[in-house]
Structures are given as structure tokens and as C-alpha cells.
Image (cartoon, coloured by chain):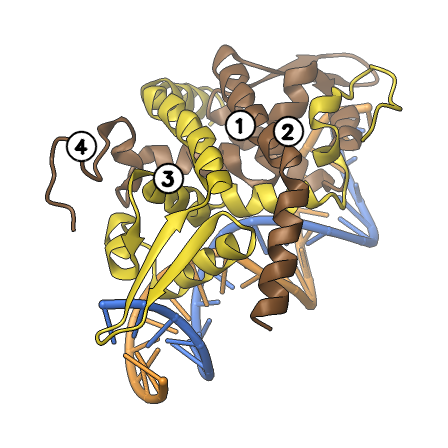
Chain colours: A brown, B yellow, C blue, D orange
Amino acid sequence: MESDDTNGPTDDLVADVFARDCPSRTIVDHVASKWGTLALVALAESPYRFNALRRRVDGISEKMLSQTLHTLERDGMVVRDVQSAIPPRVEYSLTDLGAQVAARLRDLIELVEGSVNEVIQARNHHDSSAA
Amino acid sequence: MESDDTNGPTDDLVADVFARDCPSRTIVDHVASKWGTLALVALAESPYRFNALRRRVDGISEKMLSQTLHTLERDGMVVRDVQSAIPPRVEYSLTDLGAQVAARLRDLIELVEGSVNEVIQARNHHDSSAA
DNA sequence: CTGTATCCTCTCTGATACTG
DNA sequence: CAGTATCAGAGAGGATACAG
């Protein structure tokens, strides 16, 4: 059980996120979401225009890209730069905060990519032993 | 793996994840999901039994905790230790891989928690200027 | 205590079509 | 090119009841 205050389960560096209605949960959900993650990491490579980003993030629909970018812009992760012209040209880039978040996401993705085989083996083992 | 790419936008450390049907996308989705994140970070503090973990991750339902743990176990992130006894006692802990993933998630969460105010300000600014 | 089974709701997601 | 509008299906997620 957890009866230890000094070193117990509550490691207060991440205390908030365990609380039901903490704002950080929402933010984490946004940046760690299926498309949020990919959009941020892509924009960490370089700024992208809408359709270029859509091509970069393979499989995303226009609707989800639009929605994801709106959310990330509202959270202060992404900057939307509209250059009024014909044809329209809109460039998306990261804020400082967005870049920091993207760096963390990148660390996570790199770790996962390096562990794909390990995970696949674990799945095979799991599926065969507990079929 | 993929050294074939010229350098361009593909920064090949995270090349795979941008492809539609890459296994790493699924894995990232599992560990970065709403409940997956919290379960992993909680288990990084210490092993937990089912109901203790349920209390730790405030707001999660039995169903989602069970489902999340199954997925993470299958992916080789979590170990389920069943001690046959009455009453049943099942303890969950992290594998090495799970611990590494949890550490990255923790980095992300700490960054986000430190930026909550910044995000809230960004939201207020966004909502007031573009209402 | 540790879950599974079921039902039900609601959001997320993806085509498709259309506008500036 | 850069989106928005709309519709419909799939799946996430929660409440409750029940089983080992």
C-alpha cells in the first residue's frame, strides 16, 4: 500500500495529471493524440503549408488536419501564418513551446521505433501463449 | 532500415511513423493514449494492484483500465503477476521497455505541467481575438 | 479482490461535396 | 490552395451487473 509520503506514489512532479479535471490532461491529450503527435513532429522538421503537411502526415484527412491544427494553435503550440494572396498561402510552424513538446514526442517515437521488433515479438508470444 | 532516403523532409530517425501502415504508429497510439499514458506513468512510480491503480488514475473505469492493461501487456510494456490466492492478488509492473517509455512520457508530462499557465493564456488570447 | 459481459451514449474519424 | 459542411460508421468510454 502507499503510506509513504516522502517517496511514495505521489511524485509531485507529475501530481496534477492524475487528477480528474486537471487542465494538463487535456493538453497532453491534444499533443499526444494520434494526429497531434505526427503534426507536431512534422512541423519540428520545418514549417509546412497545409497540403504539404497533409502529404507528410500520410493518411490524415483534410478535416482532421484542420481540426488538429486549430486545437494546437489554440493551445499555443502552432502558429498559423496567413499570407493573403491568390492562390492562398498559409504556413504553419511551431512556437517555442510547441518545439519543446515536439522534441519530447520525438524522443518517445525514436524509442518506440527502435523497439518495434521487441514489441512484435512480445505480441506474438502473448497471442500464442494466451490464445 | 531505411537509408535509401535522401535527406529532405524525412529525418530518418522518425521516418517510419509517418507512413500510413507503420507498426510504430499503433504502438505510439497505445502508449500515448489517454489512459495508456497515465497507467504507464503510474506504474513507473511503483507496481500497483488493480484497484490501487484504479484509484491512482482518477476517473478511469474498470473496463478501460482492464483494456488498457491488456493492450500494454500484449505490447510488452506491462507485466501481470498473478498470485493465486483467496482473495486474488494481481500485481502490475513495467518491463524495461515499459519503464523507458514511461520515462519519456514523464518528460512530456512534466513539460506540459510546467506550461499549463502559458497554454491557458494562449487559449484565452485565441478565444478572445478570434471569437 | 479481480476482473468480464452487456448495453448505451457520444465523440472521433473518414468520405464526399462545396466555398473563398 | 486552403479550407468548411455534412453525413454516417466505428470505436472510445462509462454504468451496471455478474462471475471466478
Q: Is residue A6 above or below residue B58?
A: above
For residue A68, say whether it is visible.
Answer: no
Quick check: do tags 2 and 1 share a chain?
yes
**Chain letter of the residue beneath label 2 in the structure image:** A
The numbered mark, 4 or 2, whose residue comes first in the sequence reads: 4
Residue visible at 87% across and 22% down in the picture: B5
Q: Which mark is residue A39?
A: 2
Q: Residues within 10 Å of mark 3 (few under 14, many from 20)?
A: many
Mark-to-mark CA distance, 4 and 1: 35 Å
Q: Which mark is residue A72?
A: 1
Q: Secondary structure at mark 2?
A: helix
**Chain letter of the residue beneath label 1 in the structure image:** A
Q: Residues within 10 Å of mark 4 (few under 14, many from 20)?
A: few
Mark-to-mark CA distance, 2 and 1: 9 Å
- The amino acid type found where label 1 is placed reads Leu
The numbered mark, 2 or 1, whose residue comes first in the sequence reads: 2
CB atoms at circles 3 and 4 under 8 Å apart?
no
Quick check: do tags 3 and 1 share a chain?
no
- The amino acid type found where label 3 is placed reads Val
**Chain letter of the residue beneath label 4 in the structure image:** A
Compared across the picture, whether A111 is left or right of B46 comes to right
Q: Quadrant of residue B80?
A: bottom left
- The amino acid type found where label 2 is placed reads Ala
- In this figure, which residue is indicated by the disc labeled 3? B41
Q: Is residue A22 above or below residue A2?
A: above
For marks 4 and 2, give the one nearer the viewer. Answer: 4
Of residues D1 and D10, which is closer to you in this image? D10
Q: Position of residue B55 (x, y in %)?
A: 24, 54
- In this figure, which residue is indicated by the disc labeled 4? A7
